[in-house]
Amino acid sequence: MKEIKAFVKPNRIQRVIEALGDNGFKSMTLSQAEGTGAFKTKGARPSLDFHVTDSPVIKLELVCQNEEAQKAIDIITENGKSPEKGDGIIYITSIDDAFKIKTGESLKRYDL
């Protein structure tokens, strides 16, 4: 399985989550975040919580099967990009397994 973490501009996130949902990616987590990358969004401001200049971003996290990862990346890239610089970044990590808290059932599908 793969975990996808995408940091997307707030004004693009609705398009991204709708496109993911339309393509079968129903379970994801969204968090508001502050980015401190090289690109500073117009309107970036000094953070009240941290001693950095920040740009608002939304962190989208989802876990999918290995064979679904590239499709999710393509959807996020296509719907998250804009004409401006600094559209965000996507990180991919491998997940050994995941379990439902209620049942303890594994979510991993074993490839034969």
Image: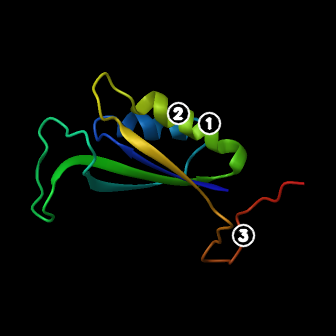
| Mark 1 or mark 3, earlier in chain | 1
Q: Which of marks 1 and 3 is in front?
A: 1
Task: For marks 3 and 2, give the CA distance.
Answer: 26 Å
Residue at left 63%, top 72%? 100
Q: What element carries label 3?
A: loop
Which residue type carries mark 1? Answer: Lys
Residue type at mark 2?
Ile
The secondary element bearing badge 2 is classed as: helix
Q: Which residue does the numbered mark 3 point to in the structure image?
A: 106
Q: Mark 2 points at which residue?
A: 75
**Neighbour class for label 3 at 10 Å: few (<14), some, many (≥20)?**
few
Q: Which residue is drawn at 20% across and 40% down?
A: 40
Q: Are marks 1 and 2 in contact (CB under 8 Å)?
A: yes
Label ID, residue 71: 1
- What x and y, as percent, mark residue 75? 53, 33
Specify the quadrant that holds the C terminus.
bottom right
Q: Residue furthest front?
A: 38
The colour scheme used here is: rainbow
Could you tell me how far apart the alpha carbons at marks 1 and 3 are, in whole angstroms? 23 Å
Earlier sequence position, callout 3 versus callout 2: 2
Residue 97: give x, y in percent of width and height. Answer: 68, 67
Count residues near mark 2 (Cα–Cα under 10 Å), then give few for <14, some for 14-19, many for 20+: some
Q: In this view, does 2 lie above or below 49?
A: above
Residue drawn at x 41%, y 42% as measured from the top left? 89
Q: Residue 103 carries which label?
A: none
